[in-house]
Amino acid sequence: MSEKPDYSFELAAQMRGLMHVAGVDEVGRGPLCGPVTAAAVILNPAHIPEGLNDSKKLTAARRRVLAAEIMASADYCVAHASVEEIDALNILQASHLAMCRALAGLKTVPDHVLVDGNRLPKALTISAEALVKGDGRSVSIAAASILAKEVRDALMVDLAQQHPGYGWERNAGYPTKDHLAALLNLGVTPHHRRSFKPVHNILYQDVSVSD
């Protein structure tokens, strides 16, 4: 396995006649609040931005630059599954729903999809393969991971202004010490995932106390 993602999976698909290859990735499975966000990207082979990598391995400044380059040169779409959908479906199925929405929003219908992770969305009806740690192996998935993180982080900054005190502008909704403390002190917001244990436990305690 190479240290940085490359275009080899895309080329292998193209050699089989699958010319339009999309990479898809999601961000936001772990947070206690906010949507889960997925991006789908079909890179232009003639204009692949330099330095694409797993979004977690990039600085915020580098991610911003790369996101702008991806949006200027590639076919892309970013989509979400809501907190209500996460609670109704479970986080894995909601992640897959967001992925399918992102793929459906591409201008070009992909011939093949490279999905980050070890499972394919059941609703996918086109050729696809799951790549474990795909954002560190495929530049298309890496590009998708960058766009998904940029969009979701910006959304959580906006929500933080509406609900100050939880630190979402810093923690993006993940269960950090300050977020968990705020959840106890300030309570549950409409953006919290009620099916997630720390949130569920607080709601259940409130019901028990009021009973």
Image (tube, helix red, strand yellow):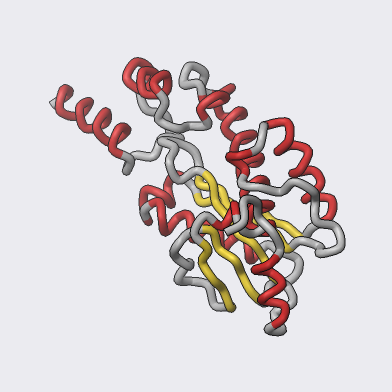
Q: What residue is at 16 percent from the left and 22 percent from the top? A: 209
User: Which residue, as the protein is rendered here, is positioned at the far front?
Assistant: 2
- Residue 97 coordinates in the image, percent (x, y): 50, 60
Which residue is rendered at x = 74% and y = 77% of the image? Answer: 19
Q: Is residue 209 above or below residue 67?
A: above
* Image position of 211 (left or right of 27): left
Locate the C terminus by quadrant.
top left
Identify which residue, 139 or 166, lies in the foreground.
139
Report the side of 186 relative to 61 (left or right). Answer: left
Q: Is residue 109 visible?
A: no
Q: Position of residue 136 (x, y in %)?
A: 59, 52
Q: Give the total of numbered labels.
A: 0
Out of 122 and 139, give the one closest to the viewer. Answer: 139
Where does the image place residue 165, in percent across and percent down from the top left? 48, 16
Observer-nearest of 5 and 152: 5
Relative to 53, does residue 205 appear above or below in the rendering?
Answer: above
Q: Residue at x 66, y 45 (%)?
A: 146
Q: Going 65% across and 51% down the picture, which residue do you hit?
A: 4
Q: Residue furthest right?
A: 46
Q: Is residue 21 visible?
A: yes
Vertically, is 125 above or below 121? Answer: below
Q: Which quadrant of the rendered structure holds the N terminus?
A: bottom right
Q: Is residue 159 left or right of residue 19?
A: left
Occupied quadrant, residue 205: top left
